[in-house]
Image: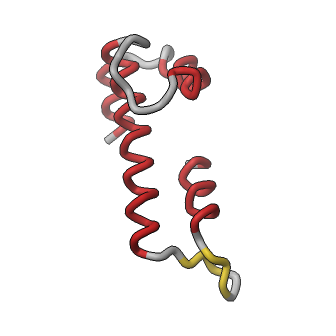
């Protein structure tokens, strides 16, 4: 959730105390979040040798958190 807010903040314009995001920039953020979710699932289901979009080191904290969940629980969380 923090990643999403950070990404939206970086590409949005602050206007009258609200975050205004341009539609094309929103699609970029949406794609970014999709790729991150895909990577997390690939790492959980296939291990750290999975073919992912970003560096495995970006997911060190996530890997620690994912170790507490079974595969089925983790997939349910992603949905």
Left or right, 48 with reference to 46 = right
Please state which of residues 8 and 68 is positioned toward the viewer in this rendering. 8
Q: Quick check: 7 above or below 73?
A: below
Q: Residue at x 51, y 21 (%)?
A: 56
Q: Where is residue 24 in the image (x, y as percent from the top left)?
A: 40, 70
Task: Decide if residue 2 is on the left or right side of residue 66.
Answer: right
The picture places residue 45, in percent across and down from the top left corner, at 32, 17
**Colour scheme of the rendered structure:** secondary structure
Q: Which quarter of the picture shows residue 57?
A: top right
Give the residue at the far right of this rendering.
17
Residue located at (39% from left, 20% from top): 43
Query: Where is residue 2 drawn, in percent x and y?
Result: 61, 48
Count of picture labels: 0
Q: Is residue 45 left or right of residue 65?
A: left
Residue 51, image x and y in percent? 33, 21
Residue occupying the point 42% across, 29% down = 40
Q: Nearer the viewer, residue 70 or 63?
A: 63
Q: Which residue is drawn at 63% across and 61% down?
A: 10
Check the picture and name the quadrant holding the C terminus. top left
Q: Which of 17 and 72 is in front in this view?
A: 17
């Amino acid at each position: 959730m923090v990643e999403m807010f950070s990404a939206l903040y970086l590409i949005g314009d602050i206007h009258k105390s609200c975050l205004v995001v341009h539609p094309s920039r929103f699609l970029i953020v949406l794609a970014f979040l999709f790729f991150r979710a895909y990577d997390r699932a690939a790492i959980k289901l296939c291990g750290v040798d999975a073919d992912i979009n970003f560096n495995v080191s970006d997911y060190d904290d996530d890997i620690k958190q994912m170790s507490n969940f079974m595969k089925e629980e983790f997939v349910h969380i992603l949905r």
